Image (cartoon, grey):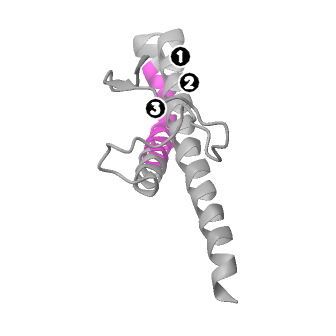
Amino acid sequence: MTVNNAERRSVQAEPAAVDSKHVADVDDWDPDSELSPLSKAVIATAVGLGLLIAAFAVIGKLAGWANDYGTILVYLAFFLWMSISGRLFWWGADKLVALLRTKKSDNRGAHR
């Protein structure tokens, strides 16, 4: 069976083992990628935060833009900008927290 992932590459799906402890998830890290999950999470958090800061920096100009270009267009674009940047920030932050929690629990037994 052939499955297409986000990069539109074809990969062979392997049959799932009954005793497998790790179940594949849609959000799993791509092993062919050059970036580690930690790198992706840090980049996503930083970019999302940067986009949020940019939105808050221009929030005072929204009324002027609404007068020039139309209220619906400007506020719809602002809402879309905030939604995408907020989702990107929280995705990265959730991944960072999950990675830090698993590292902490993995290292907990090693320091006895």
Image quarter (top left, top right, bottom left or bottom right) of the C terminus: bottom right
Residue at (39, 25) in percent of width and height: 12
Q: Which of these two is toward me, 49 or 109?
A: 109
Mark 2 near mark 3, Cβ–Cβ under 8 Å? Answer: no
User: Can you tell which quarter of the image residue 16 is in?
Assistant: top right
Residue 107 on image: x %, y %: 62, 76
User: Can you tell which quarter of the image residue 22 is in?
Assistant: top right
Q: Residues within 10 Å of mark 3 (few under 14, many from 20)?
A: few
Residue 90 on image: x %, y %: 59, 44
> Magenta residues, as a range?
48-65
Name the disc covering residue 61, or none. 3
Q: Badge 2 is on which residue?
A: 79
Q: Reply yes or no: does residue 57 show up in magenta.
A: yes
Q: Which of these two is toward me, 111 or 47?
A: 111
Residue at (47, 10) in percent of width and height: 70
Q: Badge 1 is on which residue?
A: 76
Label 2 to label 3: alpha-carbon separation: 14 Å
**Of labels 1 and 3, the one closer to you:** 1
Q: Earlier in the sequence, mark 1 or mark 3?
A: 3
Residue at (45, 24) in percent of width and height: 64
Q: Is 79 above or below relative to 19?
A: above
Residue at (44, 16) in percent of width and height: 1
Say which element carries label 2: helix
